[in-house]
Image: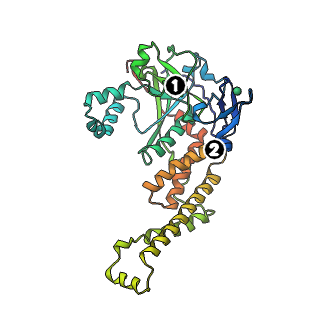
Amino acid sequence: MQQIQLVERRDGFDYDYRMRCDCGRSSPLRARAYADEINHAHMDCQHCGADIHFGRAVIAIRDEKDPALGDEMVPQLAWYHTSTWPDWPSRGFAEHAIAQSGDAAKRLRLGREHALEQATISALHLGTYEAAIENMLRRMHDQADHAAQFYLYRIRLRPDLRIEAGYRDENLAEASRLTAPQLEAAGLDVVRYLNAYEAEGTLSLAVRPAAVAAVQEIAIPVIDLVEVARMDDRLDLAIELAEMQCAANSASVRPEELTVHERKLITLGLRPGPDDVARLAEESHLALYAKWHDFEDELARLYLRGVSPTVTRDINDALGTWRRTANDHDPAQFTTRYRQMAALLTESEQVIRLLAAQPWRDLPATA
Ligand SMILES: [Zn+2]
């Protein structure tokens, strides 16, 4: 088999941003300032002094000399993607998509063939390692995938691709919902676009499935990267939190569940009444909420060294959804999950080395 060494293009997770001004040029913005939305999200243009209301809508390319801007470089780069499908982007992946969205299709009265068509004609989206990981975090937070098993893919493109000149700005031009037939009609295999949603300011690709030569795959998080289920001794906060959570779980008796005998005791002033119970419950709920917040900050300090404040917020949001819906608020389990997810960011070299050592799965050129 042909051995091709792909070029890695790493941005890391400790990056800053650039914001576009109406004058056409861009100015730098620190991740801390972006996360805190300093000056109500306003900054001055470095070039003309005009006010820029910063955010996704005016995100600019981070690196004007991004190697992905060179057409000859695009097929030489390693591209990445995350998915909840274990055999992406095969026919099986399309079939699976339908099984997953079967109920939605029924509600929308879409036929099975139509659903299959939709699943198979979508363009594939590829980006940097960082963009792929951040896409997973966004899906865990925004969608019903907070507890899903994810897979990370490393992608090799075919040579001699028809690539659109320059890049599209995701804010200004259609890029994220491009379909394979649209690309085909335009005589293109690949469209570059500026990411405004994950790894903001980097270039991603929308490609026809036939542009993908082969993929490598691993399940993530990589469990072996961290010790499992051992509460860190330094995390006194976790023990305190576990006690508070336990107390809150057992104290959640609703007033309407009180027995006649208990109501009598309340009337006689021998027990706190429903209003008192509700007030105490509310107070303990707020204290618990604040404690979980402190705990997440502590985990970020311990396990997300060298990760920017914006990406830290994204991982906390993603895992917060998991904690509230799937984890039953257990600090020890949460810590394990947090460390596993954090390792995808802090131990990315190891993750990529492991992925790059997997066998390639070749895809048919007619896909
Ligand atoms: Zn300007």
Residue 223 spot, x, y in % from top left: 50, 48
Residue 147 spot, x, y in % from top left: 43, 48
Q: Determine the image quadrant of residue 60.
A: top right
Q: Which mark is residue 205?
A: 1
Q: Is mark 1 within 8 Å of ligand 1?
A: no
Q: Quadrant of the C terminus?
A: top left
The amino acid at mark 1 is Leu
Q: Nearer the viewer, mark 2 or mark 1?
A: 2
Asked whether, in this view, residue 293 is left or right of residue 115, the answer is: right
At 42% from the left and 75% from the top, the residue drawn is: 274
As rendered, which of 161 and 256 lies closer to the eye?
256
Residue 221 spot, x, y in % from top left: 50, 45
Q: Is residue 130 visible?
A: yes
* Quadrant hosting ligand 1: top right
As rendered, which of 165 and 305 lies closer to the eye?
165
Kind of element beneath mark 2: helix
Q: Determine the image quadrant of residue 311.
A: top right
The amino acid at mark 2 is Ala
Asked whether, in this view, residue 110 is left or right of residue 22, the answer is: left
Circle nearer the N terminus (2, 1) = 2
Measured Cα–Cα span from mark 2 to mark 1: 26 Å
At 57% from the left and 61% from the top, the residue drawn is: 290
Q: Which mark is residue 35?
A: 2
Q: Which mark is residue 367?
A: none
Kind of element beneath mark 1: strand
Residue 267 spot, x, y in % from top left: 39, 84
At 41% from the left and 18% from the top, the residue drawn is: 182
